[in-house]
Image: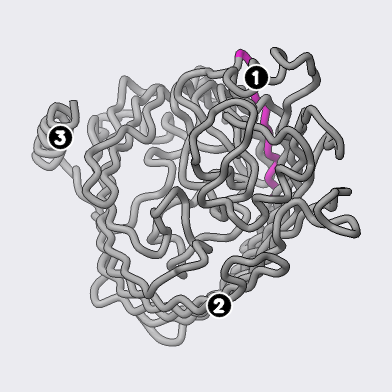
């Protein structure tokens, strides 16, 4: 299967590079076609490209991370990554396009990370419909998922850090959950899956969900809404619980250089395996993840500043005392980039992720259900040419109140090429 996918992607890439204008000098956007496909409708003077191909290749290396602060999966780090990404946009007439993204990470074979149909039903109205494995609606950072739009190397904690929660396994009591504090890279619970596995991030910023999306408006106000199979923490290709997630984002551009956004979501995050275990033991209850987020971006002169905040709540139907009905997390980041001279910039990001408190038999007083974590990352980047950038970053991480690694420094470098 992996060999077949490689052959197909290679064939499409070869065809696209032969097509007129199939390469691009600028980095690709996270959404590979314009928000207004009709704006590039064919005309007698300038025929439209029917096939566009773009992509990026990156190689990141970093010092050891024994505290697993940067893990996105078990033994898989956001600071140690080799990735080749290929985007294909096939125009189907003047108001429709088929978009796909293939990805190969760390030599693990090719995966199809995005595949969706975009239709603009009304030629003169800013209305887009998208169906398939679609771009994210919630938040700002996942919508600019390309490394060329990330001035640093790491990802914000709310979009990457692995918590102690899982979608396929549940704690039987608050004590079971607290026993996994600060161990999100490898957790185990008595209900549901018996395997040791990674926990959930607050938002899986590197993965797209499957469903349908509508986008209305462009500027100064636009609204996006989606109905998908999974949730922010656990996006899915195939439904695993019979539930759906509804998410929406309102974006306002009141003046040049300023973008403000507000997001919300509600969906079922627990898999059938986990809920079946709860029902067999005679317990029932909701199993949702709810989230609210605010984001802002401002650019002026040589400066670009971004900020984002998010609060999330998960239902946790435990079986025994001490009981847990739900847990919460809240966090966010502020980052800034300054262009020192053409091709050279400096950037910094500050992160924080906190968790609500639980009563427990393990501790004398109420304790956060996961260990609060903080991060500061400082980076510099230099573009040797327009589409080739080298980055270097130093990252400091802190985690309180757990026996595992509580602080560490990670140093990383990255080479990034896009076409």
Where disc 2 sits, the SS reads strand
**Residue 57 falls left or right of residue 165:** left
Query: Where's residue 249, x and y in %?
Result: 68, 39
The one of 328 and 127 positioned closer to us in this rendering: 328
Helix, strand or loop for disc 3: helix
Image disc number at residue 277: 1
Please say if 3 is above or below 407: above
Within 10 Å of disc 2 (Cα), the crowding (few <14, some 14-19, many 20+) is: some
Say which quadrant the C terminus sits in: bottom left
Residues rendered magenta in the picture: 242-252
Secondary structure, mark 1, is helix
| Rendering coords of residue 299 (x, y %) | 59, 69
Q: Is residue 160 visible?
A: yes
Q: In the rendered structure, find residue 6 and report the number of the disc placed on it.
A: 3
Of residue 26 and residue 362, the one placed in the foreground of this image is 362
- Near-viewer residue (208 or 240): 240
Q: Does the magenta portion include 255?
A: no
Residue that protrudes farthest toward the front in the picture: 361
Please report the residue visible at 67 percent of the width from the left and 25 percent of the height from the top: 268
Q: Earlier in the sequence, mark 2 or mark 3?
A: 3
Residue 396 image label: 2
């Amino acid at each position: 299967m992996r060999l077949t996918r490689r052959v197909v992607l290679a064939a499409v890439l070869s065809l696209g590079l032969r097509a007129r204008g199939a390469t691009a000098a600028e980095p690709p956007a996270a959404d590979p076609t314009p928000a207004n496909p009709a704006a590039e409708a064919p005309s007698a003077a300038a025929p439209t490209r029917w096939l566009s191909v773009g992509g990026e290749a990156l190689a990141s290396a970093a010092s050891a991370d024994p505290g697993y602060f940067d893990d996105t999966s078990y033994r898989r780090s956001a600071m140690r990554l080799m990735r080749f990404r290929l985007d294909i946009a096939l125009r189907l007439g003047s108001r429709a396009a088929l978009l796909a993204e293939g990805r190969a990470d760390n030599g693990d074979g090719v995966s199809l990370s995005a595949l969706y149909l975009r239709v603009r039903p009304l030629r003169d109205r800013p209305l887009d419909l998208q169906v398939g494995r679609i771009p994210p609606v919630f938040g700002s950072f996942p919508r600019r998922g390309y490394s060329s739009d990330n001035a640093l190397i790491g990802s914000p904690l709310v979009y990457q850090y692995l918590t102690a929660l899982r979608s396929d396994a549940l704690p039987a009591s608050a004590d079971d959950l607290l026993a996994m504090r600060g161990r999100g890279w490898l957790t185990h619970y008595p209900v549901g899956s018996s395997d040791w596995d990674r926990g959930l991030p607050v938002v899986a910023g590197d993965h797209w969900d499957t469903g349908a999306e509508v986008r209305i408006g462009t500027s100064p106000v636009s609204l996006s809404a989606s109905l998908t199979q999974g949730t922010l923490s656990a996006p899915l290709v195939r439904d695993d619980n019979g539930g759906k997630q509804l998410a929406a984002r309102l974006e306002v551009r009141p003046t040049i250089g300023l973008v403000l956004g507000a997001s919300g979501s509600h969906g079922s995050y627990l898999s059938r395996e986990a809920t079946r275990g709860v029902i067999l033991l005679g317990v029932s209850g909701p199993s949702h993840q709810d989230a609210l987020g605010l984001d802002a971006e401002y650019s002026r002169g040589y400066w670009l500043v971004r900020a984002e905040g998010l609060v999330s709540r998960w239902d946790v139907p435990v079986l025994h005392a001490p009981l847990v009905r739900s847990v919460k997390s809240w966090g966010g980041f502020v980052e800034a980039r300054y262009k020192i001279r053409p091709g050279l910039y400096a950037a910094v990001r500050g992160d924080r992720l906190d968790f609500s408190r639980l009563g427990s038999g393990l501790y004398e007083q109420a304790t956060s259900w996961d260990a609060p974590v903080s991060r500061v990352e400082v980076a510099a980047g230099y573009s040797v040419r327009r589409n080739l950038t080298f980055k270097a970053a130093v990252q400091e991480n802190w985690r309180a109140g757990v026996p595992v690694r509580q602080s560490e420094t990670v140093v990383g470098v990255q080479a990034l090429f896009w076409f």
